[in-house]
Image (cartoon, rainbow, N blue to C red):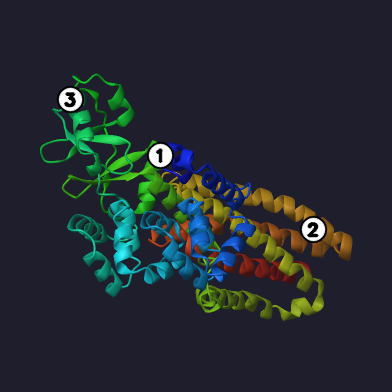
Amino acid sequence: MTRQTADLTAGASSAESPKADTEVEDLEDMALSDDYAIDPEYVDMVIDAADRNDGPRLKELMEALHPADVADLMGFLTAEYREELLPHISPDDLAEILSELDTNLREEILENVPAASLAKALEELDSDDAADLVDDLDKGKRAEVLAAMDDVDRAAIESSLAYEDETAGRLMQREVLAAPQFWTVGDALDHIRADPDALPELFFDLYVVDPAYKPVGGLAISQLLRAPREVTLWSLMEPVTEIAVDADQEEVAYIFDKYHLISAPVVDPGGRLVGQITVDDIVGVIQEEAQEDILALAGVSDAGRDATVPGIVRARLPWLALNLVTATIAVTSIAMFQGEISKVVALAVLMPIVASLGGNAGNQTLAVAVRALAGKELTESNAVRTILREMWVGITHGVVLAVLLGGATFAVFHNPKLAAVVGLALMVNIFIAGVAGILAPLALEKMGRDPAVSSSIFVTFLTDFSGFLAVLILASLILR
């Protein structure tokens, strides 16, 4: 429930203190700009209250925000101000805020929260979110927090942590609504109402299980509420898409997207129901994986708002160093043809254009190929057809761009042979760029490597090398 909804339902409190409610509403209006980002003036208000050590004002400012907005606010503050805010956040809100924070900020804040307070906050979360937070703690703090939790919650978290990171087992929540196949709708509704505290905080489906606790079907809660009480679950249930507990989270996201799922049961190797995954978790996975692929194509990692200069340098420098090596190898082709360059100095001006256009064309193909691989739109069944298509695209682009660059070269240097050299070299390089842009990620995928991480380095190297070499070889043959 959002804070705005809670305010609307608290009728008695509103009647007793209309002024207080008005102030909260004013703060809510002030906090967010039209695009739902934290207003800079609100950030200044928080900083001002912290500078004055005004605890009541800080609490008021925090309570006016949704937990997700508090998490966003944390990113605009320094570590000192974040630490000062923590005592003014309730355990219930802290749990939601922690689950919304960026990883680097979350780790920092987790270390500053006392173990007892953190244990209480984690008990408010579903097991998947709680396990994700506990995983970010160092061993000593983790032991303290788990020792402070009750046995049931601790066992659920430890069970989740036993699975590999970024798998369905870590993504799932162990709380699930299940019922035997011989139950009626009335039996299921009575069970739900008898012990509401035992239910998941968020659920969309009831899973029907056999005596071995293996899912045999499921039905949406909306369908359950519409059906007569005497109807059996067996007659209403529909097949469910089961997810293996060790499935990679990318695979899970693909399944949810392909079959338009809202939730899905997770089963262990024996086929028994061990949890469920809901769409709110999948949205986060899709965003995370998309961001990783975008950054990997550029050879960088997510720096975040609080990243340090040494951390950013360590993440980016190795890729730049590798690029330096490949660029050095590429320009060796120039050294082999110094004589041709000395005869026609214009070649030194035109070679970078040919190489640059080839690099851009290759990166276009590469981006499309990586997205297609991630979405399973490019597989062995259509790989040959896709490669041939990109070849024809490369030929077409090469011809058009060759005519344009050749014409511009002739207009500037008035040398038809030089124009022919540059035009033909560009055709060759654009063709190679298209082929490399599709083959590099396919080859890396075949080798079990992430095509988003290394493909761009290989494509850039090939287009630079082939671009320089094509210009110089053609020049040695034509410009005699």
Spot occupied by residue 73 in the image (x, y as percentages of width and height) = 53, 59
Q: Nearer the viewer, residue 480 or 407?
A: 407
| Callout in the foreground (1, 2) | 1
Is residue 179 left or right of 200 when viewed as pictured? left
Find the distance from the CA under tag 3 to the CA under tag 2. Answer: 78 Å
Quadrant where the C terminus is found in the figure: bottom right
Residue type beneath disc 3? Thr
Q: Which residue is mark 2?
A: 406
Q: Earlier in the sequence, mark 3 or mark 1?
A: 3
CB atoms at circles 3 and 1 under 8 Å apart? no
Residue type beneath disc 1? Lys
Mark 1 is surrounded, within 10 Å at the Cα level, by few (under 14), some (14 to 19) or many (20 or more) other residues, namely: few
Q: Secondary structure at mark 3?
A: loop
CB atoms at circles 1 and 2 under 8 Å apart? no
Q: Which residue is mark 3?
A: 184
Q: Which residue is mark 1?
A: 258
Residue at point 72%, 68% (across, down): 352
Spot occupied by residue 19 in the image (x, y as percentages of width and height) = 55, 45
